[in-house]
Amino acid sequence: MSAPQPERWAVVGGGVLGMLLAHRLAGAGRRVTLFEAMPELGGLASVWQLGEVTWDRHYHVIVPSDSYLRTVLRELDLDDEIRWVQTKVGFSVNGSLHSMSTAWEFLRFPPLTLIEKMRLAATIAVGSRLYSWESLDGVPAERWLRQWSGDGVTNRIWIPLLRSKLGEMYTQTSASFIWGSIRRMYAARQTGSKRETFGYVPGGYAGILDRFQARLLGEGVTIRLQHAARRVDPQPSGEIAVEFANGHRESFDRVVLSMATPIAARLCPALTDEERHRMNGVQYLGIICASVLLRKPLAGYYVTNLTDAGSPFTGVIEMTAIVDRATFGGYSLIYLPKYLSADDPAFALSDEDITRAFIDGLRRVYPSVAADDVVTVKLSREKYVMPIPTLHYSQRRPPMHTSVPGLYLIGSAHITTGTLAINTTFELGEKAISELIAMPTRTAAPAAGRA
């Protein structure tokens, strides 16, 4: 008689969240298969080539308080390799650049009066001292900001930043988004210097993902790349079958879908109408992000915040304000992100049109950039990055446990503050997986009987 086999789990979606879930399940003794539609793991944290440079497809940094991310990095023996750098922050206001990197620069910041600066500082202080977002879930972000910052600061600073980040959806966004943004910004400031301090692992996420994948394989996780899920169905046996676009089909005792909710809704016809309604009702923020190699640096600001109307992108991220230019062959690496709704028609624009608009916009912010300073431009487009925390979102988000026994949905839709950070993603994963691991396990049929 064949010995009973341990529970078999599938994690469908090989971004960093799916990798973490597979890692924790394997550590708890489950047999895990991790499926990913793309040729490599990592999702939004994946890497690519810019000419001869290999680096992250989107911009990522570590702040000292990123406890969930740093726990994983310690497990991968990478936390001690983090390089910490004090950074500068710039603002483009009325066509002029201003630094707001120190307390002195904040006091001298020309666009605001002294009273307005005091109100802005009070807003940040209040946001950083609130320990939970729940009380802000039903409060409009603009109303909360006007209450604490006043009309002048809100109109000249907050609203332009919100509009550049969220478009007109900012009017439907809860103050929990402001809370999440302030908390992360505040966490990047060291107690002594009050300067923003960011970190990175040498080599970027290429090294992190390689190390993580090797750890998963060492834990017995089966990794199947280029497996795009096409259908997920419960079986009469109690198992769940996952069918893939390449024709592969496999059944598991439990399945975790780590993906955007509209995609999950299409995959699972056995879900209830109410579940699909909730999944399709999540309003996602997407991104078009240009990675640009320049022959020379800009102004040394890690972030240049844009408050002027008409910019084709959200901000300017100068990665080489943190990472030495030698890493990029002596070039400067710039990211130009544009956040937009998942159904925005800009996703249909050609690479040529977007690139032209982005480079023209960069030269308006930084006129010293000449046409021949641009070495390489490469565009990333992702429609489902982060759900927008609209009013009372926590009451409408889809549940993790679906109506199909053994089928779970764990993804960014369960992040309620709209914080775009890998640490927040790992925090979600750690809390979710502890609940899944605590569930009673069941013995499964011998593996030979699986389809």
Image (cartoon, rainbow, N blue to C red):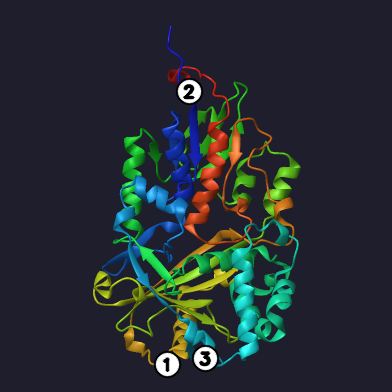
Secondary structure beneath dot 3 equals: helix
Type of amino acid under label 2? Arg
To which residue does mark 1 refer?
367
Which of the two discs, 1 and 2, sits closer to the camera?
1
- Left or right for 296, reference 72: left
Q: Are marks 1 and 2 in contact (CB under 8 Å)?
A: no
- Residue 46, position in %: x, y? 40, 57
Q: Which of the 4 quarters of the picture holds residue 378?
A: bottom left
Secondary structure beneath dot 1 equals: loop
The Cα–Cα distance between marks 1 and 3, rounded to whole angstroms, is 24 Å
- Left or right for 275, reference 249: right
Q: Which mark is residue 108?
A: 3
Type of amino acid under label 1? Pro
- Left or right for 77, reference 379: left
Crowding at label 2, few (<14), some or many (≥20) Cα neighbours within 10 Å?
A: few
- Residue 310, position in %: x, y? 59, 85
Q: Residue furthest top?
A: 1
Type of amino acid under label 3? Arg
Q: Which mark is residue 450?
A: 2
Q: Earlier in the sequence, mark 1 or mark 2?
A: 1
Q: Earlier in the sequence, mark 2 or mark 3?
A: 3
The Cα–Cα distance between marks 2 and 3, rounded to whole angstroms, is 69 Å
Placement of 308 over or under 278, stated as above or below: below
